[in-house]
Amino acid sequence: MYSGSALSTQGITLERHILEQQLAIPGATGDFTGLFQQIALAAKVINSRVRSAGLAGILGLTGEKNIQGEEVQKLDEFANNVLIRSVEAGGHLCVMASEENEGIVRIPDQFPTGKYVLMFDPLDGSSNIDVDINIGTIFSIHRRVTVGRHGTEADCLQRGASQVAAGYVIYGSSTVLVYSMGESVHGFTLDPAVGEFFLSHENIRIPPKGKIYSVNEGNAQLWPASLRRWIVDMQTPKADADGTMGTPYSARYVGSLVADFHRTLLKGGVFAYPADKKNPQGKLRLLYEAAPMALLCEAAGGAASTGTQRILDVAPTSLHQRVPLYIGSREDVAAAERFLREE
């Protein structure tokens, strides 16, 4: 486990870990490693600014709204620009897409292009920025499907199941980068003494069933009755096999997907952002939030669903498509789906 700067001499760096993963793939060119180096650099820059935001004068709103109709935080704008500038010149990408941009983000003509597609939420949970609650960056990587120098929207509109890799960075009491290439999930903690991410959570496995649920119950009156019954079921103690009364699920909700999912991934349970009367299509973005988290969750042994369909099987039709999300321990997600069928 992470033990401070001692990891600088004993630990495995993120760069080394990804390089070793790539060496195991026949025909690997190192492009993927180079792209990850650029993403990790962006995360370090964003982390530095997040930790000094109040002093740097970049708390608060810009006065503008993004494509989602949400007020843009100054740190949202900063993180978005840092990510774009960090990866656009490397020659690894043909196109990008961001939650903060209405259309695709082209690679400038003066830079070479490559075979990968990057999509990201530059600063998830940004409504929590000014109150110092954990926030994060989410990213998703695909291989391009079009030909030619520049990528197109078609390269971005791929099912989550075709992701080459996905991950997130959580900026909290420590800064942790978690990623998966689809077969396993690993976490790396930033050692500020040396400025490197070191392996701290190897081969993360989510418990098959948890004891924590994470959902905004302030929206309960907008939910169907079946969803409310599911919540009541988790709140109700049940008898164990020996007849003793068990404990109900505990409720934990931060309001930042990265923070809530990180806890769910490590401890088990379920996170949900359901569809409701106000958001009948769901609230979370498929490409920038739901699909990358679903890849991570499934690679760790969990499940991710819209309530009726596996998230990774959803075919996107637009860059900012929204979906309901139920994600976490496999048995807990299955229970949610079971209740939702009982209309």
Image (cartoon, rainbow, N blue to C red):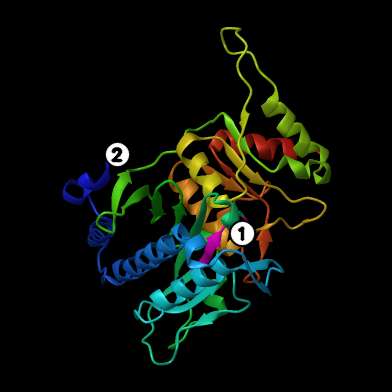
- 174 left or right, relative to 131: left
Q: How many marks?
A: 2
The residue drawn where x is 65% and y is 34% is 335
Q: Is residue 86 above or below residue 247?
A: below
Q: Alpha carbon of mark 2 to alpha carbon of mark 1: how far?
A: 36 Å
Residue type marked 1: Val
Measured from the top left, where is residue 231 in percent x and y? 71, 33
Is tag 2's residue or tag 1's residue first in the polypeptide sequence? 2
Q: Is residue 181 above or below residue 332?
A: below
Figure quadrant of the C terminus: top right
- The residue labelled by disc 2 is 1
Q: Residues within 10 Å of mark 2 (few under 14, many from 20)?
A: few
From this viewpoint, is residue 66 visible? no
Q: Is residue 290 above or below residue 304?
A: below
Q: Main secondary structure of the magenta part?
A: strand
Residue type marked 2: Met
- The residue labelled by disc 1 is 314
Q: Which tag is nearer the camera, tag 2 or tag 1? A: 2
